[in-house]
Amino acid sequence: MAYNYKAYIFDFDGTLYDNKKMGFYLCSSDLLHIHMIGAERTARKNLRGIDFKSKEDFLKNFYGVAAKVSRVSVDRFAKWYEKRYTKNLDKILRKHYKAFPRTGDVFKKLRTDGAKLCVFSDYCMVNERLRAIDLSPSDVDYTIDAEDC
């Protein structure tokens, strides 16, 4: 490879695949809860840049802000997010998206050259979502999401 970097960090959404129309697919897959989808985005924007002590602390704040914005209980929002939203996200990726061509080859080449690879996402379930776009989590050294940070 032309560069001698020891590590590479790849953002998931929009970098590993073309995420055009994701908002449309998310909204049309769950019209009954469209207000929660908007609240999810708003909560993430409102919490951006804040350092939380733990994943639990982040989720408590995230669910609290999103529940307030969507005018539902924290428990209702959390259940919707964990049981419906994340599953819809996975289904949509599997149905409508694939990794950019040769992304897996680039990962293998960089690792062969001795580099460590990390995939980062603002959203949870990075390994599952990699598989959904036909990439193998075993082709990278680390996966991490904002909720874990």
Image: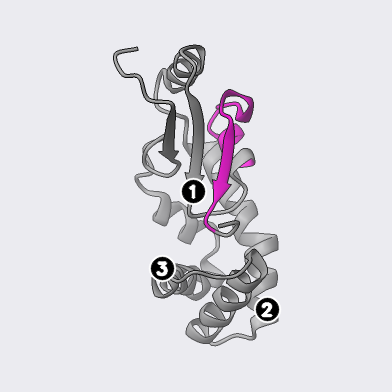
Mark 2 highlights which residue? Answer: 76
Tell me the crowding category of disc 1: few under 14, some 14 to 19, or many 20 or more residues within 10 angstroms, Cα based. Answer: some
Magenta stretch? Answer: 128-146
Mark 1 highlights which residue? Answer: 121
What residue is rendered at 42% in x and 37% in y?
A: 10
What residue is rendered at 39% in x and 70% in y?
A: 45
As helix, strand or loop, the secondary structure at mark 1 comes to: strand
Q: CA distance from mark 2 to mark 3?
A: 23 Å
| For marks 2 and 1 on the same chain, the one whose residue lies earlier in the sequence | 2
As helix, strand or loop, the secondary structure at mark 2 comes to: helix
Mark 3 highlights which residue? Answer: 48
Residue 142, position as x, y percentages in the image: 58, 36
Residue 6, position as x, y percentages in the image: 43, 26
Tell me the crowding category of disc 2: few under 14, some 14 to 19, or many 20 or more residues within 10 angstroms, Cα based. Answer: few
Q: Is residue 55 above or below residue 144?
A: below
Q: CA distance from mark 2 to mark 1?
A: 24 Å
Residue 102, position as x, y percentages in the image: 42, 17
Closer to viewer: mark 2 or mark 3:
3
